[in-house]
Amino acid sequence: MSWQPEVVTDSTGKFYTNALRFATKEEAEISANDLMSRWLLVRECRAAESKDPVNYRLVKQGDSYVMEAVKDVEVSPEPAK
C-alpha cells in the first residue's frame, strides 16, 4: 500500500492524481498541498490510499521538502522529517 496526492481542479468535484506514490499519508498530503499552492485552479486536495508501490519520498531540507525518486522502498509508518 502507498498514499497518493489528489486534487480537484474543476466544478465536477472529481479528484485527480498523478504518478507520485508515498509511503505515508503525511507525505502525500504535503505533496498535494504543495501542488495546491502552485496551481491556481486547484479547489481541494487530499491524500488517498493506493495499491501502487511507493516510488517517491520527501526529504526535509531546511524549512521545505525535496522529492526524491526511490525504488523498492519498504513502507514505514514513520512520517517525513
Image: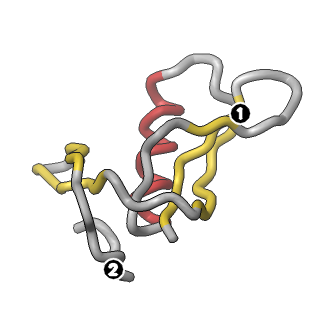
* 34 displayed left or right of 68: right
Q: How is the image coloured?
A: secondary structure
Q: Nearer the viewer, residue 30 or 16?
A: 16
Given the current orientation, which residue lies at the most extreme right position? 12
For the point 39% across and 67% down, the residue is 23
Location of residue 72 in the rendering, given as x and y in whole percent from the top left corner = 26, 65
Q: Give the residue at mark 2.
A: 76
**Amino acid type shown at disc 2:** Ser
Element carrying mark 1: strand
Instruction: Residue 64: tell me if it is visible.
Output: no
Residue 8's label in the rendered image is 1
Category of crowding for the residue at label 2, using alpha-carbon neighbours closer than 10 angstroms: few (below 14), some (14–19), many (at least 20): few
**Amino acid type shown at disc 1:** Val
For the point 57% across and 64% down, the residue is 51
Q: Earlier in the sequence, mark 1 or mark 2?
A: 1
Residue 24's label in the rendered image is none
Element carrying mark 2: loop
Q: Nearer the viewer, residue 55 or 78?
A: 55
- In the picture shown, does residue 64 fall above or below 77? above
Screen quadrant of the C terminus: bottom left
Location of residue 65 in the rendering, given as x and y in whole percent from the top left corner = 23, 48
